Amino acid sequence: MSGNSFGTIFRITTWGESHGPAVGVVVDGCPAGLRLSEKDIQKELDRRRTGRSRVTTARKEADLAVIHSGIFKGKTTGAPISILVKNRDADSSSYEKNRTLFRPGHADFTYHEKYGIRDYRGGGRSSGRETVGRVAGGAIAKKFLALEGLEIFGYTTQIHDIKMGSFHRKEIERNDVRCPDKEAAKQMVDRILHFKKKGESVGGIIEVRAKGVPAGLGEPAFDKLDADLAKALMSIGAVKGVEIGAGFQAAGLLGSQNNDSFVPEGAQHQTTNNAGGILGGISSGADIVIRAAVKPTASISLSQWTVDLKGKKKEIRVEGRHDPCICPRIVPVAESMVAIVLADHWLRNRAARL
Amino acid sequence: MSGNSFGTIFRITTWGESHGPAVGVVVDGCPAGLRLSEKDIQKELDRRRTGRSRVTTARKEADLAVIHSGIFKGKTTGAPISILVKNRDADSSSYEKNRTLFRPGHADFTYHEKYGIRDYRGGGRSSGRETVGRVAGGAIAKKFLALEGLEIFGYTTQIHDIKMGSFHRKEIERNDVRCPDKEAAKQMVDRILHFKKKGESVGGIIEVRAKGVPAGLGEPAFDKLDADLAKALMSIGAVKGVEIGAGFQAAGLLGSQNNDSFVPEGAQHQTTNNAGGILGGISSGADIVIRAAVKPTASISLSQWTVDLKGKKKEIRVEGRHDPCICPRIVPVAESMVAIVLADHWLRNRAARL
Amino acid sequence: MSGNSFGTIFRITTWGESHGPAVGVVVDGCPAGLRLSEKDIQKELDRRRTGRSRVTTARKEADLAVIHSGIFKGKTTGAPISILVKNRDADSSSYEKNRTLFRPGHADFTYHEKYGIRDYRGGGRSSGRETVGRVAGGAIAKKFLALEGLEIFGYTTQIHDIKMGSFHRKEIERNDVRCPDKEAAKQMVDRILHFKKKGESVGGIIEVRAKGVPAGLGEPAFDKLDADLAKALMSIGAVKGVEIGAGFQAAGLLGSQNNDSFVPEGAQHQTTNNAGGILGGISSGADIVIRAAVKPTASISLSQWTVDLKGKKKEIRVEGRHDPCICPRIVPVAESMVAIVLADHWLRNRAARL
Amino acid sequence: MSGNSFGTIFRITTWGESHGPAVGVVVDGCPAGLRLSEKDIQKELDRRRTGRSRVTTARKEADLAVIHSGIFKGKTTGAPISILVKNRDADSSSYEKNRTLFRPGHADFTYHEKYGIRDYRGGGRSSGRETVGRVAGGAIAKKFLALEGLEIFGYTTQIHDIKMGSFHRKEIERNDVRCPDKEAAKQMVDRILHFKKKGESVGGIIEVRAKGVPAGLGEPAFDKLDADLAKALMSIGAVKGVEIGAGFQAAGLLGSQNNDSFVPEGAQHQTTNNAGGILGGISSGADIVIRAAVKPTASISLSQWTVDLKGKKKEIRVEGRHDPCICPRIVPVAESMVAIVLADHWLRNRAARL
């Protein structure tokens, strides 16, 4: 109830603070019989890891996943899977200085107001480090979905005002911003480094695509597939907007432009995909396409105005190690959230008919 | 689990089909002692009602709310509140003709795939008529929140490519599109009527604002206030995108532009509100501002290509009575969903501290 | 969250007060494609109805079930099923007199303390009339389970100190106490009438048996099948104890006496059934056998001591129309709760394996 | 959904197998500001620990609790509290021999049927070792409730056919069976040792009492306080029956005998407590008294008949280290479950009124 669990049948519960001894996740509801090892988890955690390029934070975490339960002889047993990742490179020193100040754009003020107590070291629970558990859970969801022929991948479509122009899937993991357009990627990296030097951060847009989703996933009314996906992505720290298919563009279209016609081959084939693969909250069989707007990282080293615990005006410089643009690292997190939603609805859908 | 309930403590469960005998809602978890009458519900249902202007469908429903439980001597008792609204003007005749065809942009195909059986009269469960229950539940949430000083109101900011230029709150309920800009409203109405004549429909954007929200609402990780709001709005039929505060604009900003500085007066006062009133998933005390992209109504009377139950190519003309633009009627629905999320988190927040 | 819903996938939400206009239930999560009519519901409601014999209350309710949603052409569609039953014979006059007194054994005092407001007419929400919704929901669960070969039936095994001696299933519905032992049934009826004349009430024990349950229903740890069944039965107003299989008798046994040996035929065949069909919280394929202790009805016409709203000592005589022994009418309610738990776990079990 | 979580606002999720690397729990929803250290957890884990007396198993586990999250400067922060306890003395050798046989009274057969895969080492997930997480979670619930003046304690009232005759609270923790009657305790220990020598096990009854519970905890209809308590206790492995207050005795009483009269002093004072502190599912302010029937441990070293994976008749001797009577060790587990239910309903009750 306190909001640290997600999913109904396939359900993850994450725990841990940025500068505590470890972070982790309990995955409950994974079907029995799935071949699973720590390597499956590690592969995805490595994609999320820091310190891998010039455009991410300098904090270096090996992020070694240890599975503590739920696996026997290399397969899931139906029991909850507990995964723990130790924090090794936490450095709380820079946070002591600002512990009485509320960093603009961060959760410092709101946590203080809500709880009356706040772990100010690295953002505590509100840190992006919480997403380690999401990615570990997502790795399991992906493994399950892959058996069913589903494939989920994400990429950056925009950084600051630079937009992806072409799409080459192989490019995605070859550049530091996970952009499927090689040229745009170069410009994006330059843009990030340009503003990083100035102590700034930049925002962007990422997109996740799910291929091979069968028709029928999603529930009517409130647990529509797109509603659950929207919650899933909006629950990622820096995300300020989510859209499916044509999204906000649909606002400017006419019905005849926006409706995707059905065409004979297999019925789920459509000429266009403005719906983003979801009709009436239920998957249609077309690719699911969803985008998230990512705000510029709140931590910048420029001087900003804020207040302290007593409400007095203060100047603040946020030190510590930060990502100048979080988009590339949000990609695996967003993929994970999409995978968890799809795995959950896959299992929910088993109860739809006699 | 089948997705017809929403909320955790303050929780609504809607039921009913477009052409069934009635639609309704059960509201569970409303605190005891709230003064409540059918008038409170009716007032909001009337705002959602059809047949009130030239830009809505011709279907005419009185939408009379009858409370069947949970009230004693004019006050809530803590027991579930069951509200029923009869369907009186349903006309299923036009749906018989197309009962073997999948209407483009509608849930016909996906419901068929999911359930193997489909109430094709007026869209059945996937009809916008389901939102009657949301608005009835939202009316109760609003009444509760009003006691606490919260106020929630929505309006249309864009229809097709016409955007609101100025904001005059009093204008909102004075025009047929619920736009706070009198001049833009006129153009919007004209635009809708223009395309209505052609058998078309148009999309738009609506915005909801909540004033007087205290700091502290929302839970960490997954049940962030913005995540729950995103799900709430995305669960409304025609919505294809949701954004908070600066939303997708934030993608093009720098950290120093996007961060809202804190200023001394009461600490929650900020110079800007790019965050839309939510930091780290928890309300900051600033206004909550959230927008939804609304697609053009899927029902258009132009000829479209589709397939039938057997996958054969067919031409379809969707008759029946439809809204050429659903934005004005989505406004009270969106307000209701926001109210339900806030009422729920208000009650959840009571457990945050010792 | 306010406790008026039960089940996870197959989920009922009941609403309504004893002397309000109606009571009802919303059943969400029933699989699509189940043949269902009002007759299926009515048959079970009739078994629960009052005024059918000398040992039940004089309140006469036709209890006509009206289905408002979720059915199309005689089959469930996967949409929520809303059922409403009007209250017709409510007589609130006798409650006015005692409205400032707390009836011993009733929820008057605790509702007053919890909510600060109380619908004192007929017990309001705490009335046994709430179980109409359970029985309606249970009727659907039974219909679903019957397709899968499950059969659920209950009976009275003890009234006051008279215990069932023999078991003849056909006898159950032939006598007024639903006892499978004709002779014991006669004595039970006499005993009830004897004490009814004196203004007293009597308690008893009922048992529910489920045959044809496959092995594998139930979840580890907390949602064990027996745990959910215990909650299901204990949530019925007058129930003060629940036991599975050997139950409290097991406390006096040795391991070698209590363990049920497995025997070759089909593996789930066991020589004894002390486990009551559940091992480690999961069904074994043997009959599920569960018992509930039913307290004597709290409403008696003898004079009792109590206090009023101000805490002053008062004498009270509870008038109105009451069941002198609630066991026979609890039987269909208990069957319904067992059916709902089994239907829910049947569907949950679909997610257990790849 | 897979049943490894319990509670709604105060919610625990346990994980881990008997012979895996560790067991643990995530406690979500504990209010911020509670002073908490590993000592608070350890104190309760030590009460549950094995190897402390002649009547428990020889397996020796230090059961050292390590808190990994949710605490800052000695207080809870509102973030989830993750606790891990390593398994150190697991010895899987004796389980290899019987890995193809289903132990009578155990979950071997049902897990096999449900999941198609089974961690047979020490019972895997179905082991009593899972309760480590419950006791750790219960320790936190107790600490929270103690601040509010609640006190929860349990004891053994019966072993085999030896019943407690007198009640001296101080005796409870002084003897090996946790019986409040010194003389009965001696006989109980002798009885257990007598049958232990023979390779047998014995059952019993335990009781938990909660003092200082305010009136008003519990929700109407399904989440009645007694319903949630029944589920809580029945979810403990060896429990086969649960009763509140007079429990099964109430079946033989008359209404005038069973009803507890209210008396003036504070209104919640009653002359008797047949209701066990709960009326209409809501606490009355009287002590909550609940009992659980505990079956004789399924593991006995006598020869038993069973079948193997292929359904063939086989003789089995269950070796390994087992408790000849689990009652004394179930006492802290049962207390923990009661504490978790009360903490959860304490927090839920904060939403009952305006």
Image: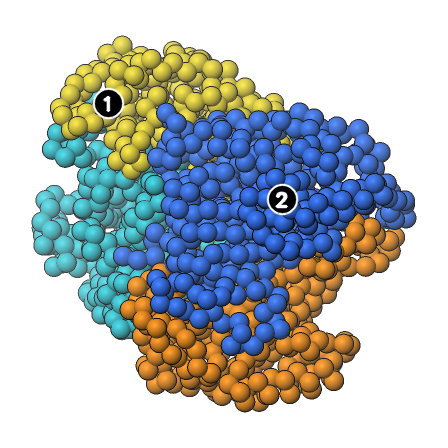
Chain colours: A cyan, B yellow, C blue, D orange
Above/below status of A282 relative to A185? above
Q: Is residue D54 left or right of residue D155?
A: left
Q: Which x, y percent locates residue C213?
A: 42, 53
| Mark 1 closeness class: few <14, some 14–19, many ≥20 residues within 10 Å | some
Amino acid on which disc 1 is placed = Thr
Above or below, B306 against A112 in this view is above
Q: Are marks 2 and 1 on the same chain?
A: no
Q: Which residue is mark 2?
A: C178
Q: Nearer the viewer, residue B277 or C351?
A: C351
Q: Count neighbours of disc 2 (C-alpha within 10 A) and say few if under 14, some if 14 to 19, many if 20 or more.
A: many
Q: Report the chain holding disc 2.
A: C
Which residue is under mark 1? B100
Residue in the picture at 28% in, 24% down: B298
Residue B102 falls in which quadrant of the image? top left
Q: Please indicate, yes or no, whether residue A298 appears anywhere in the rendered image.
A: no
Q: Residue at x 39, y 32 (%)?
A: C35
Residue at the spot 22% in from the left edge and 45% down from the top edge = A213
Is B139 above or below relative to B89?
below
Q: Tell me the element at label 1.
A: loop
Residue B52 position, x and y percent, is: 45, 13
Q: Secondary structure at mark 2?
A: loop
Q: Mark 2 belongs to which amino acid?
A: Arg
Q: Which quadrant of the figure has residue A255?
A: top left
